Amino acid sequence: MSKARKSSAEPARHVADCHDLIRVQGACENNLKDVDVELPKRRLTVFTGVSGSGKSSLVFSTIAAESQRMINETYSTFIQGFMPTLARPDVDVLDGLTTAIIVDQQRMGADPRSTVGTVTDANAMLRILFSRLGKPHIGSPQAFSFNVASISGAGAVKMERAGQTIKERREFSITGGMCPRCEGRGSVSDIDLTQLYDDSKSLNEGAITIPGYSMDGWYGRIYRGCGFFDPDKPIRKFTKKQLHDLVYKEPTKIKVDGVNLTYAGLVPQVQKSFLSKDREAMQPHIRAFVDRAVTFATCPECDGTRLSELARSSKIKRISIADACKMQISDLAKWVSGLAEPSVAPLLVKLQATLDSFVEIGLGYLSLDRPAGTLSGGEAQRVKMIRHLGSSLTDTTYVFDEPTIGLHPHDIQRMNDLLLRLRDKGNTVLVVEHKPEAIVIADHVVDLGPGAGTAGGTICYEGTVEGLRTSDTVTGRHFDDRARLKDEVRTPSGKLEIRGASKHNLKKVNVDVPLGVLCVVTGVAGSGKSSLIHGSVPASAGVVSVDQAPVRGSRRSNPATYTGMLEPIRKAFAKVNGVKPALFSANSEGACPNCNGAGVIYTDLAIMAGVAVTCEECEGRRFQAAVLEYHLGGKDISEVLAMSVTEAAEFFAEGEARTPAAHTILGRLVDVGLGYLSLGQPLTTLSGGEQQRLKLATHMGDKGGVYVLDEPTTGLHLADVEQLLALLDRLVDSGKSVIVIEHHQAVMAHADWIIDLGPGAGHDGGEVVFEGTPADLVADGSTLTGKHLAAYVGA
């Protein structure tokens, strides 16, 4: 009887409740070696392992990619035509997937009109608020938008009415908030005309000094044959009209020697040829010209607010929308909380929740008018998190890529709380992470390895955090590693004086940065570290800056081309085989004619998702068959590009393949921990940390005496941090000065000198709260950094 009662009290589990696992079988994406893994749903799973062990390949390229691909397939083919192309991952079985929301470190678009407010919809809500409550009332929400220009017009309109054609005069006007002077960009570009031409010479004497504007070429034909001025007359003797035609004339159709051409003045030409392009993507000599000739200044009409005078005239409690966007978000949240207006109550609740999310996630120091392109990778990732924090979706899979990047140890606990909150709402949370403070909160840990690249791609451990500590994996062995404070610190050889630094939130900071030592600049996120170093260190100091800006390059670019290593390799192949070096370039004469050296053939299926298929002719090798007949040290060029950096370093060290120039660059790549990359791996597949270390390796041969590194531990495993510290020591011992902006306590403990900024973020920071040795910082214990460093070293 009792058994019967018990069974009626506990009904059998419904079959729909049995799907508690995401099952992956036979995953072979990138370097994964037939990986099988089961991940618990509605739990927090952390993926660990050395850089390049296959974490991102499993989480992003397999699980998240397949989830997104399957969701995209539910849309009509018309809509799919506007979506990114996603190929099916190389995996046998993927079972139990839920909708994946990827929150990665990809930088936000650098469009000058994209701001923190526009990407989070906070600006949209503010515009509605001001259109309802602003005094005087100036119009609809678009009257407060710096992306909408004010337009008005009038004209006759023809209409058919009662069988007759009637003409009526109609007028229309659109009131936008865009500043007419800077067109909503906040800054205006001014072109220095003395850098465009030498007015003492005539055109035929080479007066135009713009790169590529030779009188012997295409531009010479246009400017000499246009007939607007005499090409033999010195420019300083031009009449006002002739000078205007040379410098400012708008595009005009002309005929030269019977050929139809378009003539435009020098300024419109420069704006079209150079200013419409990304500065970082320019060739060095063109970038130098643009830096000389073009100055960007704050718009004098809107004072950088991007908004018209009319938009700035409407106010709520003496605050205009420009003032609101300029405020620190934590202050704006307080101001919004004081607006009690029943007519817009639902809007205020939503806006308040969004602003509070900024503060909660540790970004309260930003302002809504901050350009989105200036956010660091970690800040961009946290901004993307904001739209998911208040989401009512459950049973989704959130995928995070090192969410603690750019966070001070003080802020990591807050990030942990947010991840746990997402899990507790019934979501599956997958996190790729290296920091022990973030790994400890995991319900389940998957450790990949044992090495990087071809030496990785297998599951080394699955289970709890406690089990990971005792496992004999690389992560397990280094999990409780703690760097010790140095017994002796180096003596500075000089100092770099910074006086009155006031960029962004800095409060007229005066500080001496010691030279000839390892100096670490630290402080909570938003305290002013980057503003102090990147914004105030004089360029004359011979500074080599290695920041986290993404490497510019197409899918044809790879470590061999980016570092300049391919040039000596091509020459070595050419010398041994007695042929031209251009044959060994996949972008030149040696390219496979079928795929043009890309290795794959891209097929555009119009409204359906396009596909990329490995080229059948070269089998993905990218070169013509005839080129692959030539060998160096027993290998052809495609086999060399398939080698890892470590293998290539041995290959080019001795024997027939001995190439000192390539071997030197390969040695630097090994030094920065990129030995697992293959020489031909596309740059577009590298993580942010890998790209930064690639830039560091490229700059290690530069003449500059001062190296500035911006969080070089990004994406580094605990075991790799030791290698980085050894590299920093080698740089300092070779006579370089190294300044590191960093949050990692191991780097702080290893420093010779620490400059700590704070005490808080935004307007609560911007001051130097400590400068001295790490031991002094621990002994002082008054700053947040000091307390966390003391806890880390066990002091």
Image: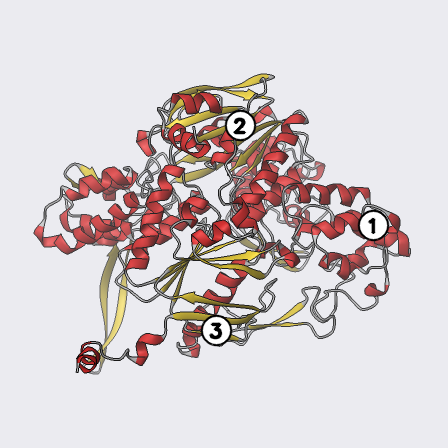
**Label 2 or label 3, whichever comes before in sequence order:** 3
Q: Residues within 10 Å of mark 3 (few under 14, many from 20)?
A: some
Q: Extreme left residue here?
A: 342
Q: Measuring from the top left, give residue 452's x and y in whole percent.
A: 62, 54
**Label 2 or label 1, whichever comes before in sequence order:** 1
Q: Locate residue 435 relative to residue 595 in the image: left or right.
A: left
Q: Secondary structure at mark 3?
A: strand
- Choose top left, top right, bottom left or bottom right for residue 726: top right
Q: Which residue is mark 1?
A: 571
The quadrant the C terminus occupies is top left
Q: Cβ–Cβ below 8 Å for labels 2 and 1?
A: no
**Towards the viewer: 420 or 204:** 420
Q: Amino acid at mark 2?
A: Ala
Q: Which residue is mark 3?
A: 94
**Label 1 or label 3, whichever comes before in sequence order:** 3
The quadrant the N terminus occupies is bottom left
